[in-house]
Amino acid sequence: MQTHNLIQGSPEWHAHRAKSRNASDAAAMLGCSKYMTRSELLRAVHTGLRAEVDPAQQRRFDQGHAIEAAQRPAAEELIGEDLYPVVGTVEVDGLTLSASFDGLTMLEDTAFECKTLNDDLRQALPHPGPEGNDASTLPKHYRVQMEQQLLVCGGQRVLFVAASADGDVRRCWYTPDAELRSEILSGWA
């Protein structure tokens, strides 16, 4: 994996994302995103124009970043290693794929992905976990993002954390899925 000295959310990070095949866009590329259609993604890629973030979205993003920061120490304790946020790329079959990681270990073998807890995630992850929860029950758009992250970093697992501001936390381990990885590569091609 080639790492890039980019701060997530910075103008340079946005410029990198605008010309990359991003893990966070992979679900839209496959047509399984709740937030963007494949047509909307194609339009954004070809025109360079993306919908502006409105104040309500920005508040949700800010809350999500606060939840992620609050969950990082517990994730590091569970993983047993420090995590660092990083942006990385890898070339696979002539495609340059990108991923922004909420956290990655120094050996790049374990990643941390944090989302704001919602009803879909409560249903998929009924226990605090990670024991007792099965990543295969996560909605596909989350699994697609993590699969591309593992493809980019060459990692073996992702600690997926879904948490609310009031302290409800659910966790599971996501591990590589060869069939989903093949679908992602075919989709980007």
Image (tube, grey):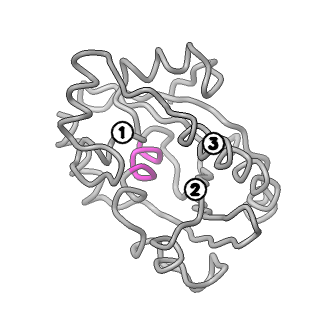
Q: CA distance from mark 2 to mark 3?
A: 14 Å
Q: Which residue is mark 3?
A: 59
167 sits left or right of 62 in the view: right
Q: Which residue is mark 2?
A: 115
Confirm whether the magenta stretch covers residue 5.
no
The stretch of residues the image draws in magenta is 145-151
Q: Are marks 2 and 3 in contact (CB under 8 Å)?
A: no
Instruction: Report helix, strand or loop for mark 2.
Output: strand
In percent of width and height, residue 71 lies at 75, 57
Q: In this rendering, which labeled residue sits more in front, label 1 or label 3?
A: 3
Rendered position, 39 above or below 14: below
Rendered position, 148 above or below 46: below
Residue type beneath disc 3? Arg
Q: Going from the N terminus, do you reach mark 2 or mark 3 first?
A: 3
Residue type beneath disc 1? Asp
Residue at left 41%, top 40%?
23
For disc 1, the neighbor class at 10 Å (few under 14, some 14 to 19, many from 20) is: many
- Where residue 13 is drawn, which disc sits there? none
Q: Which residue is mark 1?
A: 25
Toward the viewer: 48 or 74?
48
Residue at left 44%, top 38%?
152
